[in-house]
Image (cartoon, rainbow, N blue to C red):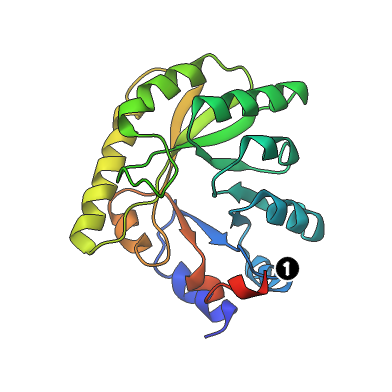
Amino acid sequence: MSIEENIIKIRETIPEGVTLIAVSKTKPVEDLQKVYDMGVRDFGENKVQELTDKFEKLPQDIRWHLIGHLQRNKVKYIVGKVYLIHSLDSIRLLDEIEKHYSASGMTAEVLIQVNIGREENKTGVDVDDLEELINACENCNHVKVRGIMSIIPQGDEDSCRGYFYQIKKIFDELKNRSFKNINMEFLSMGMTGDYKIAIEEGSNMVRVGEGIFGKRNYNDK
């Protein structure tokens, strides 16, 4: 199926109120333009360099989402270019974001990435350390937390639902508390293989890559 056909098919499965992010890592700008021409405005990239390169070549009304691990020494390159940082996972990264956005007189919109499966090969804050990170966010003047993001361990439908349920529970608990810099608007969970389950479990932001663009071209990079 073509990219355009994939978009039509996926949209039929996404209810109103759920944001579709087209995860475009490793894909050429020509493919992104096809998705843009189908009306999609939210695009997700994993690497800062790739995001900033595409930022310069594509329409300026695109909302760019940085969904991969953000290295502290790369923060300065995304100021003013990223709509939402999905991968806030430590106080040290938070301090770096605060520093660079403060210097630019701007405010970073971020999601806290939670490592719900406690996987060593994945980034994200451990649930046990979440409260400490939240307290640090409350002391910032140039960072606004707008929700939670998570990448769950691979598994069957039951295990997926279990992890999504846990993340939604954290999201709801935080939503019911009163904060200065934290507002639980976005729950970013679910990818090509499990986004339908994620939506059923409460996700309002899904990240679909291969389901739109096909297999990734890692060998071309």
Q: Is residue 129 left or right of residue 42?
A: left
Q: Is residue 219 left or right of residue 194?
A: right
Q: Say if residue 180 shows up in the picture.
A: no
Q: Residue at x 58, y 78 (%)?
A: 3
Residue at the right extreme of this rendering? 56
Q: Residue at x 26, y 37 (%)?
A: 169
Q: Say if residue 46 shows up in the picture.
A: yes
Towards the viewer: 162 or 61:
162
Q: Residues within 10 Å of mark 1 (few under 14, many from 20)?
A: some
Q: Is residue 9 above or below residue 179?
A: below
Residue 104 place in picture, x, y as percent: 77, 26
Residue 36 place in picture, x, y as percent: 67, 65
Q: Is residue 67 left or right of residue 175?
A: right
The residue pinned by badge 1 equals 29
Element type at marker 1?
helix
Residue 211 place in picture, x, y as percent: 47, 72
Residue at the bottom extreme of this rendering? 1
Q: Quadrant of the C terminus?
A: bottom right
Residue at the front extreme of this rendering? 120
Residue 94 place in picture, x, y as percent: 56, 27
Towards the viewer: 50 or 13:
50
Towards the viewer: 9 or 128:
128
Q: Residue at x 64, y 22 (%)?
A: 142
Q: Is residue 138 above or below residue 128?
A: above
Residue at the top extreme of this rendering? 139
> Which amino acid does the dot numbered 1 rest on?
Val
